[in-house]
Amino acid sequence: MNRFLIISPNLLCILNNGGHFVELNQVWEGALGYPRGELRSKSFLDLVHPDDIERTRGAMAPLASGHEVHFENRYLCQDGSYRWMEWHAKQYRGLIYAVGHDVTERKRTERSLKERLEFETLLADLSGHFVNIPPDQVDREIDATLHEICEHLDFDVAGLWQWTIPAPQYLTLTNLYRRLDGPPTPERIDAEELFPWTFQQATAGKIVAISVDDFPPEAARDQEISRRFGIKSSLTFPLRTWNDKLIGAVVFSTVSETRSWPEDLIRRLQLVAQIFANALARKLADIALSESEERLGLASASANVGLWALDLETHQFWTTDKGLELFGIPPGRTMSFDDFIKLVHHEDRDKVCQVVDQAPGSDYDEVVEYRIVKADGSMRWMASRGQRRMNSKGEAKRLMGITQDITDWKHAEAAASEARSLIAALVESTNDLIWSVDPEKFGLLTFNSALSNYFFRGLKLKISLGMSPEDMVTGAFTPLVAEKWRQFYLRALREGPFTEEYRVATGDRTLLLSFNLLERSGEVFAISVFGKDITERKDMERTIRRAAREWQTTFDNIPDLVMILSREFKIVRINAAVLSRFGRPKEEIIGTQCYTLMHGEDKPCDVCPFMKTLVSRKHEEAEFYDSTRETWLLASTDPILGDDGEVLQVIHILRDITGLKKAEAETFAVRKEFWRTDRLLRMGELTASLAHELNQPLTSILSNARAGLRFIDSGTIDINELKDILNDIAHDDKRAGEIIRSLRSMVKHEEGERTTVSLNDVVREAVVLFHSESVIRDISVETRLLETLPMVNIDVVQIEQVLLNLMMNAMEAMPDEVRDRKISLRSEIGENHKVRVAVSDRGTGIPAEELPSVFEAFFTTKQSGLGMGLSLSRSIIEGHGGSIWAENNPDKGATFFIELPITEGGDR
């Protein structure tokens, strides 16, 4: 037994009932690569391919019944590969004896033969199937075949590309099958640019079978693009028709692994490519035939032609359906020559019959034009052309020809005749000079009355047909002038149409001459000339040029910087002031963005009004400070609008307003001094009342202090009494402090900063300052203040000044003899997001004619007044963005109103 195990070339093994190895021969090591010791620790099924385990287990099951078994499976080698084994096994005395034979090569041969047989069957089926396939199903069958080939031969991608007729280097992907994902395949490529080497080989009729690493050096571009699309191997077959015309290519590719291309596989796939080529050729031929038939149908229909035949013996008349349609007869009907003659207009019947009678004896085509009257009463013009047909005896037995509807042509001919008459009338009616000459002697062929009148009025010459320039020599039309006209005509013959300005011989007019060649069958038969008097236009051009120079002079003399800008901020035009300010050549400035020139920035500045003008299409302006030149500038923009109302360009003007700014500052300083002076005057008027007002809390403080001292001196101190005394002192001290604080704020030199306050608080403080004066003058002051009054942002001192001024004026408007002497102050919400305060008196009111003037400077109705109080009040209120006005009350007195804007977020 051991000797048999040693000398046998097959795999021998002994297994126990559990299927584990008991003994193996050395062939196992050589065939599978495992040491025998390692195999003894395994079972027989451990090395079987996973797909074959169940089948092997089933095949070995009969061993338990004493039967001999025979089966095949794949067995695992130590290097991870599998080999096909054929096994014979039998159980004996509790052990299984098995003999294995390596049949891997046989299996490969069988598989190869099977695949080849299947492929040959596929080719046979394809060949027979594609022969009879309708052209409209070719693409669908090609898709199915590509799918089947890829699955059968384990290709990853297959595509069929067809050449583009106008540009053969372009290929369009018409069919594609892809098994694996990857970079998308473009639908159209420039093969000569992307795959130049492969394209050259294919156009030469060569099959290209290659792997990506095997491209020759001259195919570097093909290799680069193949790698870009993930192609590792490709097989390209050019597709050629039976007449060797290249129509495309079919390409098989792999992207998962590199593979070789055996000659046998290439030959078989070449047959597939030829089947595809033949099918596509039939499809293309079918499309071409179909298009040809469509073009022929379109040509026949567009020609509006009917074919006909006339038997001269039987007078049987035959025509095509198109001919019947032209005659207004339903298709499929038959008709005789008499039926045809009845359709012909009665005025044309003799003419038609005469042509038919003389046609048998004529060697030429006979043509006749006539009218037919259809059954619906409509009339159409027809043209028939026919010739005789001879029989074997040389006798004319039949006429054959065509009939065409020429109604539209007849109408067009009539219209053309009318148009010629109209053109002749227009030529005669125009004041422009129109004429033509022959190309040899340049004699007049045609001319209009304008040319005739021109020569007669200017030269007293009556021109006629045939006259050449030499024949017209007279007066100012000298031989030199005649020669100049000959040169004009020669230039037209030499160079073709041209235009020339011409100063007439008399020197007082200018003509714009247009020379053209008139041709017939490619030959020049005349030179036409159109002469337009442009004397007035030339004068207008000179006027326009003069105006343009004047405009430019005016433009350059504007002291402000003026620029015309495009919508993209680019400078299109500038005046001299711009050149002077920036000191740069005009060529450097034109085309530059204005913000780059002005500010050295790469974007528009925030204050630039240009963008506002683009939106509003109106004048916009803004002020800004040029820190480089320490000047204030006023920038304004105005749009130049197109017919559609859109902004085409923008006029940008920069004006130096530094002097104006200085004057405004000086004026503001003077105004501030006026305001302070007015406050001092008002304080002077209130001095006595303020002194009295201040004396009251000071006297009370003194009295309470002395009372406190007396309590201390007496030695008996009532703590509660002393608290009351001290509280009275503190209250009077606070009262005196408020009076002094209000007085100081009114007389200090500088106004305070604006603060956000309630106007009610300002009214109350002004009333406190006015309190003593109202008591002295026996005037009651009433306040009606809205509790929820929105906040305002104001200079409190200035607004108090306005309120005191209005209360003083109200007091002076009520003499002592007025019984109901009362000043009312009320606050409310006005219109347009503003707060309003009204100051009313019970005086005599303001004369209606003086109401518009009360706020003017130096206007006063008081003997001692300067007339500045209300004027200053108006400037203060308007400086706060508000307004002030006066109205007479319905019963008596007047009311002054002030309105101030509510601050943002000031509602409460």
Image: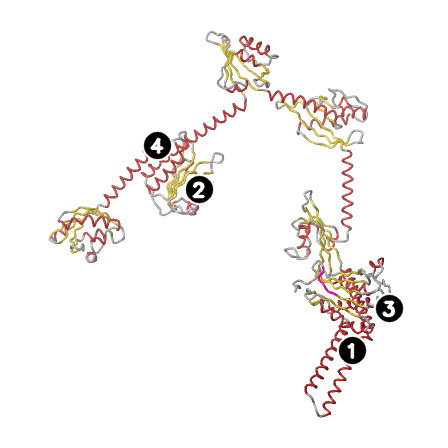
Q: Nearer the viewer, residue 479 or 203?
A: 203
Mark 3 / mark 1, whichever is N-terminal: 1
Badge 1 is on which residue?
694
Identify which amino acid the numbered label 3 is placed on. Answer: Glu
Amino acid type at circle 2 is Phe
Looking at the rendered structure, the number of numbered marks drawn on it comes to 4
Q: What kind of element bears circle 2? A: loop
Q: Please report contact status of discs 4 and 2: CB closer than 8 Å, yes or no.
A: no
Front: mark 4 or 3: 3
| Range drawn in magenta | 826-830
Q: Residue at x 83, y 65 (%)?
A: 843
Q: Earlier in the sequence, mark 1 or mark 2?
A: 2
Question: Could you tell me how far apart the alpha carbons at marks 4 and 3 are, in whole angstroms?
Answer: 130 Å
Q: Is residue 585 left or right of residue 455?
A: left
Q: Which residue is mark 2?
A: 195
Q: Is residue 320 above or below residue 77?
A: above
Between discs 4 and 2, the one toward the N terminus: 4
State if disc 2 and disc 3 touch (CB < 8 Å).
no
Q: Nearer the viewer, mark 4 or mark 1?
A: 1
CA gap between label 1 and label 2 equals 108 Å
